[in-house]
Structures are given as structure tokens and as C-alpha cells.
Amino acid sequence: MDTPRCDFWLEFSPQGSRFLLIQNTGAEPAFDVVVCIPSDGSVFKSDVINRLNDDRNWVPCTSGGNFVSFESVRKVLVETLLHLPDGGEEVKAVPVLIRYRTHTQHSCAFHLEIRLPLQNGIQFALPVTGISTSGQQDGTDADRKFARLAIDEARKSVPENDGRPHPWVGAVVVKDGKVLGTAHRGEVPGNHAEFVALERNLPTVAVAGATVYTTLEPCTTRNPPKIPCVDRLIERRVARVVIGILDPDERIRGKGQRKLSNAGIETSLFPHDLAMEVEELNREFTRFCEQHTLKLSLPTTNEDQSNWPDVILECQWPSLVHESRIPGSHIARKRPWMLRYRGSSAVYNVRVHDIDFGEYKASFPSVLTLTDAASVHPIICWKSDGQVITAHDLESLIHDPPSGCDVQQYAVTTYENEGEEIRLEDFILEVEIPVTISYDDKNGNRFKIKYLLRYDTYTEKGEMIRIGKIEKVAPK
């Protein structure tokens, strides 16, 4: 009898202290769950979670009754190096083990691997699942065989002639141990490997229950009328998808795998040595994505900034504390933005600048004197008469914009679309809103810092990202 399956995700919430959260995306609840980082528990071993339901709700991990923050495990995430590629590439990994029991009292282990992009300092830690539950080991002979076939297929990819790198992607469809079909990106010009494999090569073949091996995480967005590869895999009812590497764009990394998992499709990764081969094959595409992300950073200045006052802006999404509702609204909550100053004295006239949303604007109250921390709530108003809109806070304004709200101007074109333009009239993927704060020091010098509010409408999570350095805009 097969052991019932539970699948897990770990994530550091992308804000503030970055609490460690766990989610059960499997088919049934898990009991007596313990998280170990690294897998021997030598650095961190969580308190026991008595029951983790399969409702995909995020639950915080605790140790000694306290939330576990990203900083508390930073040292091991930096110093523990697994599978360091040749040439000293900066992707590093830490093994994670989740032990749990099923309702039938089976003792199980689920293995994950936290990979860290360290190029610009640690920005996030997103574990990725491997092939493991109930003691099953990574890299079975069959998986290796078909993963190798997918890599060989990827080497046949035909890139578009548009002057920029494109990924090398191969896909193999397997059912009952037999290969039903193979495909590579560009086999049909301009089309993804999964589309070619399923819709061009196997349009009338029953692939329900099949396993699809693909060298790159399936895309989650295409320009209509094209259908994302993730949706095609779900529609064709495949049972399992084995992925070579996740999307190299850190803003969208993991979305395809998570959407498959949420649809009940088992996901896992290529054996590590084969995954490294896929990464090497896609080195130019990965570098291109990383360089695009770096363009968000503003140019630095040679002037000494060590004595300049520094104000930090934090966005409390998602919140782990109770939030009162805004009067008159059934959904919007009072989610404060935090201004923090850690200097020895104070800064003055601290202002988060207005954000323009077409017929609306988001305004923030000024803080005349900031010595430590202050909360400011976005106030959404009609620009015509200044009337406050109580039914929408900034999050709900972005997620479900009312008529006349032009959030589309901030919508992001992600590389899972591979350069396609997205029609945004009916659907917003994610937004990146520039946010500027300004403030004065005691000598009357004015400073400015720029942030980027990034909000994902699929996961309904946001984060505040600082871009560039402090600017002195009005010296005394």
C-alpha cells in the first residue's frame, strides 16, 4: 500500500524580519511536523507543528515559541555550501529536511533545498522541492534516463533572431515507462517546448496520468490567445512534472512549480548533476535575466555617505498579526507602512510621496519628526475632490482596481513571457510601483531615497525593495 503523499513549501515572508513559513500542498494533513535546517538539524530545528492541514495556508515556524526570522539562520545559509559549481558560481544551497507523520501513522521525510542568489547580498531564500517522500531518494534510474533525454532535446532548441538570449528547453512526455513524445523550444517557430510536445505532437493522445520532463520551469503567462504551458499541463491532466531548473528571473521563480502543485500535480527536480548541466546550457539566458534585474538599481555616487541620515521604509505584507478592517470595507485592512530611523538624533519633514493611479491617488501623512519608528497608512482619494475611498486600501486597489484606477501603468512584463507584450485590460500579473521618500536633517539638508513596491496579484503578497542609494537633493 502506498504511503499517502504530503508536499511542502517553505518560504521567508518577503518583508521586514522575513519570518519562516511552511505550507502543506499535499493531498492530506500532516502531523507532528518538524523542520530541520540543515537536514541534520544542527543549526535549526523547529518546534513540533501538531497538525498542518492540506489547505495551503501558510503557517509560521517557531523555535522555543518564537517566530524564526531569516536573520536567525543567515549564517548557515551563507556558510553551508552544497554542489558548488565549477568556476565558483554564486548559487549555493542548504539541505532542508521536514519530518512528519500521516494519519495512518507512517513516519515520512520530505527533502528540500534552499538555493541562495548571493550576487547582490542575500535578497531571499526560496526552497525548491526534490524527489522525496517516505524515504524515496532523488535521481531514480528512470528519472535520470528521461531527464537526460530532455536535455538532449533542449540542445536542439532554435532561438528567435531578435538579438537577445533565449532559453534552451526540451520536453519529454512519458507514460507507463514509455516515451509518448519529445519536443524542443522553437521546433515550431516561436513556440515553447511543452506546447509543441502536447498540442502539436500529441494532440489526440491521452496523456492523463503521464509524467512530463522539462528542462525549464513551465511558464505561467502567455500573450492571448496563447495559453501558458502550466495551464496546458493542468488541462491535459498530467500526473507529474519533473523540472530541470526554475526560472532564473528571481521575481517569478517558482510560480510555475507552485501553480502545478496547487492543481494537485506532483512536481520534482532533475538530479542535481543534470540540473547543473541545464544551468550551464542556459548560462547566457540566466546572465541576461540577472542583468535585467540589476538595471533596477540606481547609479551610485562617489560622495561619502557614511554620515548621511538613513530612513528605512517597510511594507507590512503579508502581516502575521491581526489587522483591523477599514470601516465600510469587508476586505480592506489597515496595513501600515513603517518608517524607521536608527540614527542618534532625528530627521524631520519625512514624507512618502503621493502615488498616482489615474483618477485616484494614494497619499501618506507626513511625519514632522522621526526619532525611531512611525506607522503611516495609505489614504486613497479621488483626485477630483479629495474624497477618501474607504472601501480600498492600497493592496486591494492594486489587486482589484475600481473603474478609473490606472494600476496597469505599473504592470510588469516578466521573462516567463519571453519578451511578449501582455494585454493588461483584463488581467494584471504583478505591479512594481516606484515609491519615493524625502526628509531633512537637523542642518536643513534634504535627502531622498527610492523604493520599489512589488506586488504579486497571484500570491497576493507584496514587498518593499530599496533601489539605489541615498541622494542629497537640497544641500544647505
Image (cartoon, rainbow, N blue to C red):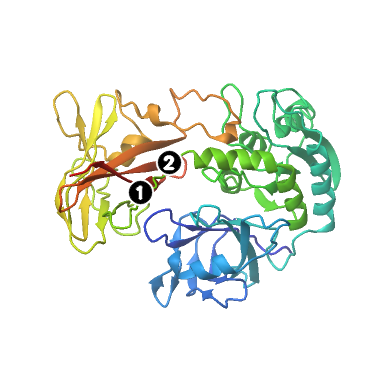
**Label for residue 49?**
none
Left/right of residue 296 with respect to residue 288 in the rendered view: left
Residue 340, above or below 456: below
- Residue 101 seen in the figure: no
Residue 6 image-quadrant placement: bottom right
- Disc 1 marks a residue whose amino acid type is Glu
Taking the spot 75% from the left edge, 43% from the top edge, the residue there is 281
State the SS at label 1.
loop
Taking the spot 41% from the left edge, 45% from the top edge, the residue there is 300
Residue beneath disc 1: 303
Instruction: From the top left corner, tell me how far across and down residue 53 is, in percent.
Output: 50, 60
Q: Residues within 10 Å of mark 1 (few under 14, many from 20)?
A: few
Residue beneath disc 2: 299
Look at the numbered discs 1 and 2 and tell me whether their residues touch, using CB distance below 8 Å. Answer: no
Instruction: From the top left corner, tell me how far across and down residue 233 is, in percent.
Output: 67, 37
Q: Which sits in the foreground, 377 or 73? A: 73
Residue 467, above or below 384: below
- Residue 303 seen in the figure: yes
Taking the spot 79% from the left edge, 30% from the top edge, the residue there is 202
- Disc 2 marks a residue whose amino acid type is Pro
